[in-house]
Image (tube, rainbow, N blue to C red):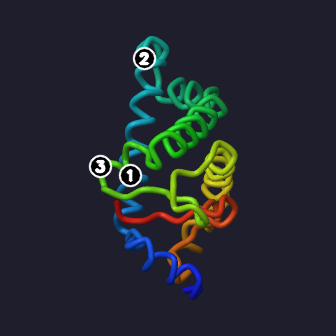
């Protein structure tokens, strides 16, 4: 790990969140957002007669779902330093320089690059597993760390 990051974490009395906690937080967020999308589209799903119709309906709302994920991730990260999944797992996102909640641009950057990472077979998440500071691509671009709350 970068000595500067290590010293800053020690000074702020913070520890990096484990990959397991981060993964569980992501799963919680995905389940929550999926349920919200299903609730919003319940009438359409209920009227679908075949599995193919359900798949086509889901495909028609991919961009809306991506937009919903970006807004969700950016808003909660900026406002609370954590999404609902992270709050449940008792971890939070902090700005690398100030160790406070990321600002609007960092939160938005992080949310967008999270989608990019997901699009490329979660390679950005794998990067975080292999990197000593556990920074994923979206953490690197937004200059953030995920720490225990």
Q: Position of residue 77 (x, y in %)?
A: 51, 46
Seen from the viewer's position, the closer of residues 102 and 33 is 102
Q: Are marks 3 and 1 in contact (CB under 8 Å)?
A: yes
Q: Please, what secondary structure does the residue beneath circle 2 have?
A: helix
Residue at horizontal 47%, vertical 23%? Answer: 50
Residue at horizontal 51%, vertical 83%? Answer: 7
Q: Residues within 10 Å of mark 2 (few under 14, many from 20)?
A: few
Residue 119: numbered disc:
none
Instruction: Quickly name the residue at label 1.
Output: 86
Residue lying furthest front in this view? 11
Q: Residues within 10 Å of mark 3 (few under 14, many from 20)?
A: few
Residue at horizontal 49%, vertical 14%? Answer: 44
Q: Please, what secondary structure does the residue beneath circle 1 have?
A: helix
Instruction: Quickly name the residue at label 3.
Output: 88
Q: Earlier in the sequence, mark 2 or mark 3?
A: 2
Q: Please, what secondary structure does the residue beneath circle 3 have?
A: helix
Residue 123 position (above or below residue 83): below
Residue at horizontal 55%, vertical 86%? Answer: 1
Which quadrant of the figure has residue 33?
A: top left
Seen from the viewer's position, the closer of residues 91 and 35 is 91
Q: Position of residue 53 (x, y in %)?
A: 54, 23
Instruction: Quickly name the residue at label 2.
Output: 42
> Which quarter of the figure is the C terminus placed in?
bottom left
- Gap in angstroms between the C-alphas marked 3 and 1: 5 Å
**Left or right, residue 75 beside residue 15:** right
Which quadrant of the figure has residue 3?
A: bottom right
Q: Position of residue 75 (x, y in %)?
A: 54, 37
- Gap in angstroms between the C-alphas marked 2 and 3: 27 Å
**Left or right, residue 121 beside residue 11:** right
- Gap in angstroms between the C-alphas marked 1 and 2: 27 Å
Observer-side mark, 1 or 2, equals 1
Observer-side mark, 2 or 3, equals 3
């Amino acid at each position: 790990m970068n000595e500067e990051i290590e010293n800053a974490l020690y000074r702020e009395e913070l520890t990096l969140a484990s990959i397991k906690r981060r993964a569980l937080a992501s799963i919680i967020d995905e389940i929550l957002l999926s349920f919200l999308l299903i609730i919003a589209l319940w009438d359409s799903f209920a009227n679908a007669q075949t599995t193919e119709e359900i798949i086509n309906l889901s495909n028609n709302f991919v961009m809306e779902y991506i937009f919903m994920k970006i807004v969700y991730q950016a808003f909660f990260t900026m406002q609370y330093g954590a999404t609902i999944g992270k709050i449940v797992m008792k971890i939070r996102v902090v700005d690398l320089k100030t160790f406070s909640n990321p600002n609007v641009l960092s939160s938005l950057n992080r949310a967008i690059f999270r989608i990019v990472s997901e699009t490329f077979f979660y390679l950005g998440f794998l990067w975080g597993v292999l990197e000593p500071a556990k920074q994923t691509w979206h953490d690197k671009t937004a200059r953030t760390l995920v720490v225990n709350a």
